[in-house]
Amino acid sequence: MSTAKSNNNEKKNIKALFSVICLCIIALGMIVYFSTNDHSKEDTVNKNTTLVQTTEANRAVTVTETTKQTTTKKKKQTTTQPSTMEQNENNTPYHSYYTYPLTESVSRGYSEELTYDRIMGDYRAHAAVDFSGTEGDTVQAMNDGLVTGVYTDNLYGQVVQIDHGGRLIAIYCGLDSVSVKSGRYVSIGDKIGTLGKVPCESNQGAHLHLVTKLDGKVVNPLNVMNKTE
């Protein structure tokens, strides 16, 4: 009997031990499970926070850059230069006062007659007035105006084009250097450059080749300025 009781007690002890071991395993599993879930939640929170911060940062940069671009475009649109000179009583052709752009000495006058040009090898009119001078002499604006062009021409050298108002455009050809920029206003007598040579009239020495157009038609500059040769 004692042996049977002893065997029964041993079996009960073994069952109790297995039960304890099972409970320990279950407890350990639950600890691992909850620990893992906590880290996952933290990672999810961190990811969400990072995503929100990144989105906000990108949104801020985009808004700022867009605002700057819009502002820049508005500034460019509001800084357009005038295209013509305003007309007034002091710049009306044939009625107002004009000064000579160089000297009063005319080396070659205005002519619509076709004559043979030895330099160009053809017949052409001289629809301009040539004012003689010395290289480096100051060339000045013959009246108030708006500079509408500054460029170099193969035949006429450096050129300055000025809108003098009253539908009058003056083209100053044969400059050696230029002192004005396109889009700027000049006053009568202002320096626009220095005298050089006219390539297609190089046999005449240094002179200013002045062309004037009224309503797009070439006219005699001396008549416009109410001057005589």
Image (spheres, helix red, strand yellow):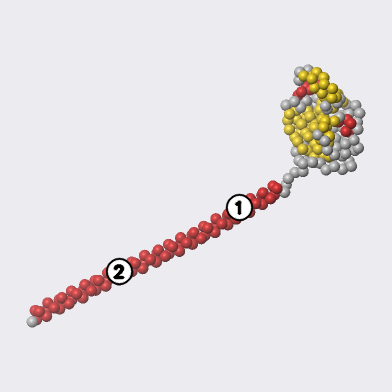
Question: What residue is at 85 percent from the left and 30 percent from the top?
Answer: 219
Q: Inspect this view and state whether residue 127 appears.
A: yes
Is residue 124 positioned above or below 48 on the image? above
> Residue 122 at what x, y percent from top left?
77, 19
> Residue 12 at what x, y percent from top left?
17, 77
Q: Which of 171 and 93 is in front in this view?
A: 93
Using the rendered view, name the quadrant where residue 169 is placed: top right
Secondary structure beneath dot 2 equals helix
Q: Name the residue under label 1.
A: 65
Q: Name the residue under label 2.
A: 28
Q: Which of 122 and 135 is in front in this view?
A: 122
Q: In which quarter of the image is the N terminus?
A: bottom left
Question: What residue is at 30 percent from the left and 68 percent from the top?
Answer: 29
Using the rendered view, name the quadrant where residue 164 is placed: top right
For badge 1, the amino acid type reads: Glu
Q: Quadrant of the C terminus?
A: top right
Mark 2 and mark 1: Cα distance apart in space: 55 Å
Question: What residue is at 88 percent from the left and 36 percent from the top?
Answer: 93
Question: What residue is at 49 percent from the left and 59 percent from the top?
Answer: 51
For badge 2, the amino acid type reads: Leu
Is residue 219 positioned above or below 22 on the image? above
Secondary structure beneath dot 1 equals helix
